[in-house]
Image (cartoon, rainbow, N blue to C red):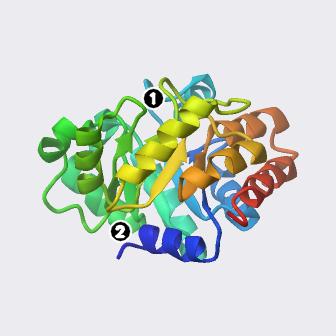
């Protein structure tokens, strides 16, 4: 069993849902990235997602797009992403997922990417713009035992969900709403019913919910319908608003989000 799946199962066995935190590599600065990720882990991040900067992150809203632009301006490349990952791995056993888009990975070379990702200490990858239909033609036969995590959406029908569940490793990333990443005040009853129905159809994997989760109240609202939550935009926004001088505000936010995963 992968460390990602075993981590989720261990926390779930303690009546606790998982908190996965996304942060674009090299944001807010290259020099502070590893320290900020360390603070996020120590504040309650059970899994971390290291975002690979890209100039056209089509699944991401304006906040993460801006952080990606800043990271690229900071000169962050895939080599730098692997360096960050290796530095985090030396400090923590927390599962690390690399999340990025197909183009930079193809330019780097698929075999080289998976080999270097594994050597850096990563445990899995999420590539949101590689659909189910392109899985077999995109991913190499040897994925170096890295989990390839697939995404479902509210538009995924029963047959498609079954195939996503069969292909996905680590967990299924359930996109809570149609559209891009961002923050929202609450989820509608209809959206919660979709999450509930999706979870019933995911039988081979755990299911993590992302897109729109930005508060402890959001976490508690969706927690009954999943095994964990993924947050990104709200953490990136906190770092943008706080600046380099008040990281404690972001760490308190992570701690609050983690509090929402308890006793579920």
Asked whether the viewer can see residue 220, the reply is yes
Q: Along the horizontal axis of the image, is 143 left or right of 238?
A: left
Tag count: 2
Disc 2 designates what residue? 119
Q: Which mark is residue 59?
A: 1
- Above or below: residue 12 compared with residue 61: below
Q: Residues within 10 Å of mark 2 (few under 14, many from 20)?
A: some
Which element is circle 1 on? Answer: loop
Image position, residue 136 (x, y; %): 13, 46
Which element is circle 2 on? Answer: helix
Q: Quadrant of residue 6?
A: bottom left
Quarter of the picture containing the C terminus is bottom right
Q: Along the horizontal axis of the image, is 93 left or right of 103?
A: right
Q: Along the horizontal axis of the image, is 143 left or right of 136?
A: right
Image position, residue 142 (x, y; %): 16, 62
Q: Residue at x 44, y 44 (%)?
A: 197
C-alpha separation, residue under disc 1 versus residue under disc 2: 27 Å
Q: First in sequence: mark 1 or mark 2?
A: 1
């Amino acid at each position: 069993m992968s460390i990602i799946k075993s981590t989720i199962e261990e926390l779930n066995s303690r009546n606790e849902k998982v908190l996965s935190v996304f942060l674009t590599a090299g944001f807010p600065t290259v020099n502070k990235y590893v320290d900020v990720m360390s603070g996020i882990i120590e504040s309650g991040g059970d899994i971390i997602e290291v975002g690979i900067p890209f100039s056209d992150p089509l699944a991401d809203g304006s906040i993460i797009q801006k952080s990606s632009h800043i990271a690229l301006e900071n000169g962050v490349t895939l080599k730098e992403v692997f360096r960050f990952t290796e530095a985090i791995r030396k400090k923590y056993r927390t599962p690390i997922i690399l999340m990025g888009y197909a183009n930079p990975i193809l330019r780097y070379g698929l075999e080289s990417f998976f080999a270097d990702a594994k050597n850096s200490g990563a445990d899995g990858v999420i590539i949101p713009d590689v659909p189910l239909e392109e899985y077999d033609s995109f991913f190499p036969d040897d994925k170096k035992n890295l989990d390839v995590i697939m995404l479902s959406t509210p538009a995924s029908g029963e047959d498609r969900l079954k195939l996503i569940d069969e292909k996905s490793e680590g967990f299924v990333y359930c996109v809570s709403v149609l559209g891009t990443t961002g923050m929202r005040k609450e989820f509608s009853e209809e959206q919660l019913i979709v999450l509930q129905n999706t979870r019933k159809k995911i039988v081979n994997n755990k299911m993590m919910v992302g897109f729109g989760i930005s508060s402890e109240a959001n976490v508690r609202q969706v927690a009954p319908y999943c095994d964990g939550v993924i947050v990104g935009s709200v953490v990136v926004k906190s770092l943008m608003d706080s600046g380099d001088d008040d990281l404690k505000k972001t760490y308190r936010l992570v701690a609050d989000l983690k509090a929402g995963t308890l006793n579920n």
